[in-house]
Image (cartoon, rainbow, N blue to C red):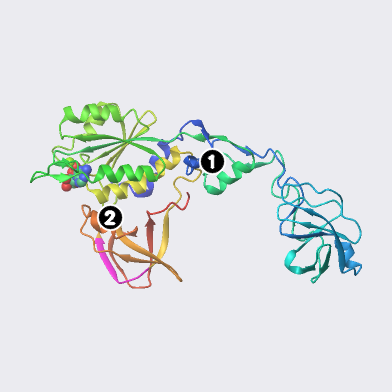
Amino acid sequence: MALLQVAEAQQLVLQHSHRLPAETAILSPAVLGRTLAEGIASDIDSPPFDKSMVDGYAVRSEDVAEGIGTFRIVQGILAGQMPARPVGWGEVASIMTGAPLPVGADAVVMHEHTRFNSDQMSLMHPVRARQNIMARASEMKQGETVLTSGTLLRPQELGLLATVGRTSIAVYRTPRVAILSTGDEIVEPGQPLGSSQIRNSNAGMLMALVTRAKAVPSYLGIAHDTLESIRPLIATGLKADVLLITGGVSAGKVDLVPDVLAEAGVMPIFHKVALKPGKPLYFGTLGNTLVFGLPGNPVSGLVGFELFVRPALRKLLGRSQPFVSMTIKAKCGSEFSHKSDRPTYYPAKLNLTADGWEAHAVGWKGSGDLRSICASNGFAVLPPGEVRYSAGDLMDVLLTEFDPWS
Ligand code: AMP
Ligand code: MG
């Protein structure tokens, strides 16, 4: 049977991922990166009045057309004040940025474009009607929808929510992600390290990846490669929205994870993907809980997370475009060749130059080599077979360091 392609596997994950229910959140920086679960209507006209956009003088533009060049300053209007009186023929009002335009005036002249003394002002430049004025309700009208459900909350959305008076909002619930490491050889950092043992790199990395994806990790610890050890931890993990397991999913003697998941009632959706590194990649569901079995090698786990878990978390978070491609075209910076039977995600260092993105493959020793990944900030996506790139050739690169749809 042909191996499942990455795009097909992503479609399967998408089909089984459902956004979480909505909840109320207080408007604060803590909601950054979450998704609105309601449409937001403005409770006001903004601006609430014709507003001066500069510090200067409110004038009647027709006066200028009649050739009058010197005006009487009849009042001063600060931001936060209402004008005390209208502006008549031959008169102007001094006005500050953000203050309401007085009746009679229809333009504002910048301070710098005038000459003035204590009670007189003369113009140095022509004046257009409505210049330097932001008209009432030109940004939004009362009752108008200003943000739709599904909008990602960035700093500017937080500012707009404040403009329309919101102190709380409906957002989709944050996914809870349980993380389980497996392997008799795995030891937590800080613990004594035996001669046949290695430290647990995956748990810390995955908790950080989950946190960066705006979900909440909870760590279950390390299971030994025995049914007795794995069973209870998987039972706990299945109570989360997403269970991430590393190690124990390939075809080794003690790769017991798929069997324990089957026992627990998890429906397997796929177990291998045409991908390097990270071919043995398990995905299954129990009710609405998503279960990912990532290969134990850290680089495989990272690639699997970026390709499948991060998009699934976006879907759970209610994002409107969870699986939109994060692949960009970059110019190959230096000659590079590679051979594989599968599409390969090869660690690359991307630089943004005046001509766009440039990618350099980093020296990489395979799926256990996390150190090279620290020298990279993306993965060149190489087609199967023998590939050779010369400097200047275009290559596809998967971005991992930022979320363009964030
Ligand atoms: P497995 O998928 O269990 O066959 O593991 C594949 C490789 O990844 C083995 O060399 C493991 O020792 C290594 N490995 C498994 N889990 C971890 C982990 N949590 N941290 C670092 N390496 C791991
Ligand atoms: Mg193992």
Residue 60 percent coordinates (x, y) = 86, 60
Image quarter of residue 333: bottom left
Prevailing SS of the magenta stretch: strand
Please provide the residue range marked out in magenta.
Answer: 332-339
In the picture, measured across the screen, residue 226 lies left or right of residue 388, that is left
Indicate which disc, 1 or 2, sits on the residue closer to the N terminus: 1
What residue is disc 1 on? Answer: 150
Label 1: which secondary element: loop
In this view, the mark in front (1 or 2) = 1
Q: Is residue 90 above or below residue 165?
A: below
- Camera-nearest residue between 220 and 324: 220
Residue 383 percent coordinates (x, y) = 32, 59
* Mark number displayed over residue 369: none
- Camera-nearest residue between 230 and 13: 230
Label 2: which secondary element: loop
Q: Is residue 132 above or below residue 405?
A: below
Residue 104 visible (yes or no): yes
